[in-house]
Amino acid sequence: MNHNFKQMKINRHPLIWVSHIISSYLSDGILSNNAILSFSKYKYLPRSYFDIRTNFSIPQSQLDTSFLLSALMDLEEGEELAFQSDVYDRGNKYHIPLIDFGVKDGRALENSIIEFSKYWNMSFSLFNSGRSFHAYGNRLLNNQEWIQFMGSLLLINVPGGPKIIDDRWIGHRIMAGYAALRWSKNSNQYKKFPTHSGYMSQNGFLNHIEEN
């Protein structure tokens, strides 16, 4: 198993951002202490229609560093851990908006995300995944809003321009009914753990952190 935990900067891992979002909704009474978070284990299959995953869930109260390290240790050879967008509570299904960008060009992202953030009245926490950027929105969506959100992501790509959004990722995620982003680095397919690198909003990049 490829457990290079020394390469993981836990204080800049997506776990921290997701914990912050869930805590804010708990404080506002929108989510209860019984809210359920979703995860999966998978092996990357390039250019495939199939997205084979083992799904599992945890109570929101268990989302901490101990959970993350335990889940990473349980991965099989070449298997990765993913956080899923779907959150369940009191018979309702919500989504934390997730984005898998197709580029690692910060300027291209900044130019494209301003109008998108304004349209959705949403800001995003940005993570460098090694090959591209991942983003996590700052508010929950209901299931119908999430479908519209995923469809609107495709409109960011313009003919003749850079492929800002990974459209194959969009296809897999809409077919599955939830979005998912990697939280591990347990195979040679990926270069690093996702690491926080700043924020995006209708104002562009905020508090951008330069990578070491």
Image (cartoon, rainbow, N blue to C red):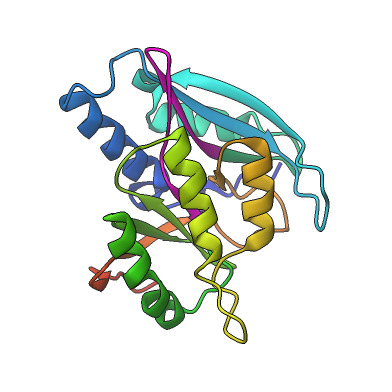
Q: Which residues are magenta?
A: 83-99
Is residue 212 visible in this depiction of the protein? Answer: no
> Could you say which quadrant of the image residue 127 lies in?
bottom left
Residue under the image location 34 percent in, 74 percent down? 210
Image location (x, y in percent) of residue 135: 43, 56
- Give the main secondary structure of the magenta stretch: strand
Q: Nearer the viewer, residue 99 or 117?
A: 117
Q: 179 or 146: nearer the eye?
A: 146
Left or right: where does residue 111 sit relative to residue 163?
left
Q: Is residue 162 left or right of residue 26?
A: right
Is-magenta flag for residue 85?
yes
- Quadrant for the C terminus, please: bottom left
Name the spot of residue 88 as percent of width and height, x first: 44, 21
Q: Residue at x 41, y 47 (%)?
A: 14
Front in this rendered view, residue 174 or 54: 174
Q: Position of residue 166 (x, y in %)?
A: 62, 63
Q: Position of residue 72 (x, y in %)?
A: 58, 35
Residue drawn at x 68%, y 51% is 171
Q: Is residue 175 above or below residue 205?
A: above
Give the tally of numbered discs: 0
- Give the image quarter of residue 66: top left
* Residue occupying image coordinates x 80% and y 50%: 45
Give the camera-side residue of 189 and 140. Answer: 140
Above or below: residue 175 compared with residue 187:
above
User: Is residue 22 at all visible to an observer of this figure?
Assistant: yes
Q: Looking at the picture, does residue 201 appear above or below residue 210? A: above
Judge left or right: residue 201 versus residue 191: left
